[in-house]
Image (tube, rainbow, N blue to C red):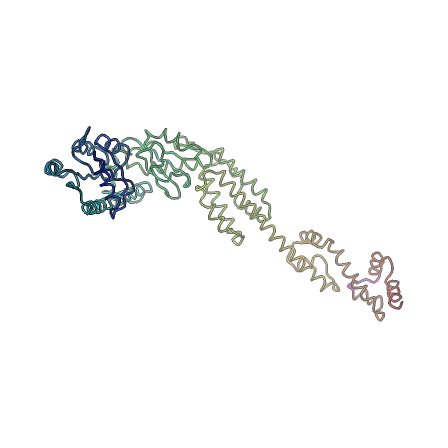
Amino acid sequence: MKTLLIVEDEKAIRAGIRAMVSRAPVAVENILECRNGEEAMEILRSQPVDVMITDIRMPKMDGVELIRQARGLPSPPITVVVSGYGDFNYAVSVFRDKVWDYILKPIEREHIFTLLKDIQNELDAKSLEKSDRLMMNRRAFRSLMLGSETNPEELRALSSQYSGKLFDGCYVSVCLAPASKPETEADIPGIESGLCFADMEGHAVLLIPEASLAVFMQKYIGSRCAGLSTPKRGAGQLRESYLEAVQARKRAFVRGSAHSYESLPAGYPKNSDTGATPEQIVQLLGTGNAVDAIRLLERVLFLAQNDIKSPDDHLTFLDRLQSDIISAYPHTPDAPEEYRKLKDILSFENAYEHHTALKAWFERLSGYLTEKQENSNKHKIRASVEYIGQRFRSDINMATASNHISMNYTQFSTLFKKYTGSSFPDYLLNVRLAESRRLLADPSLSIRSVSRLSGFRNEKHFMRCFKQTTGVSPGVYRRNLQTRNTG
């Protein structure tokens, strides 16, 4: 048990009871003491007390009056009466059926131990019953808000139990991002009868009495992008209230501030400007162009934030876009993990936070795809270089080389020069000339044979290219080789 209060005017007796309680087989978190009924009532009004052990005869306020007043509290403690031999029969007759037990002085330790164990069992049973009842009530609330079937008996019990609290007047549903919810109802400032539901189709939903709404908005909402329903009354309007709050939350998400359902626009313009299509953004990302992809994304967000497109259209667009990205590029690093984070769009506080996270994903994805494409292009150009090395003696050209690696002719021309430092014709010519210089070292080969074996189809063209490159004719080059070799 949490708190036990000892009410006794004699200090020695109080100390004795405290010592026995502290040694009992039942753990008591907090043992309080006071000297009379007046002090006891001050304590009982200021904090919950599970068990009260009180004497009968005390100054200022005796045990009889204390018990009478305590029974009028919202949560009266379980009470045990302590009395002397002369007062015992009187205590039993006065408090019959109003207290848990009577203890005759002098108090026996075993009696206290047994008593506390029995009381703890009762407290545990009540706690379990209360927990079951609260769970049943919360299930009924959720069912009503989500439009599920509700047991009529549960509905009647719910209406009856909350008739003097939440359903006493009007209430408002407040829809929040899951991370913005209070931990418990006790954390909702200034609200005694509000309710908090942590996960309602991915939303956090609070039910707030209309009379407390202004205080709640001032103390809790702040910059949170909450959606508020219009005021409703009774359990029968919970579903409508919930749907209004969710719709208002979507606009609050897009606009970046709290919104009520009654402030939503009556309609949205029929405008053909969509800002972008998911496919356009996906294709730009595939080319590594994250800048233009983000620019289109910002255009889409602008249309939603200025009520040119509805929040529902915007959320549908984002959902489709993210699905298309993961379908197009499923094997990029962290793609599934990023997708899991971003797919619950309304789990973000507002559209800007989601937009920022989406932009970061675009940049990482674009960087990865660019690097992947770069590696692929390098591999293809290496393959084309190997192809030239194997086929330079035959009649090859840039068209045959680009077809060999399945690359667009124009793209091949650009990339070949980027990775080799030479244009394709110059590179092929240099390979052939390098081979001709090697063959000229063999005196048994004629100049014409060297030309042909090096891949040149025209001897004059070979001689002209050779002289332009080396400064001498093939014949002079050969003589110079022979001179060096014999020298």
Q: Nearer the viewer, residue 476 or 84?
A: 84
Q: Which quadrant holds the N terminus?
A: top left
Residue 151 percent location from the top left of the image = 25, 44
For the image, the number of numbered tags is 0
Q: Nearer the viewer, residue 31 or 190?
A: 31
The correct choice, above or below, for 390 with respect to 306 in the image is below
Q: Is residue 458 magenta?
A: yes
Q: Left of 344 or right of it: where is 428?
A: right
Task: Name the residue located 24 percent from the left edge and 31 percent from the top edge.
Answer: 39
Residue 296 percent location from the top left of the image = 55, 40
Task: Name the residue located 62 percent from the left edge and 55 percent from the top edge.
Answer: 376
Q: Which quadrant holds the C terminus?
A: bottom right
Task: Name the residue located 54 percent from the left edge and 47 percent from the top edge.
Answer: 282
Quadrant in the rendering for residue 200: top left
Q: Left of 471 or right of it: where is 42?
A: left
Q: Residue furthest front?
A: 12
Residue 386 percent location from the top left of the image = 69, 62
Q: Main secondary structure of the magenta part?
A: loop
Q: Is residue 182 magenta?
A: no
Residue 471 percent location from the top left of the image = 86, 57
Start-end of magenta stretch:
454-459
Q: Residue furthest bottom?
A: 444
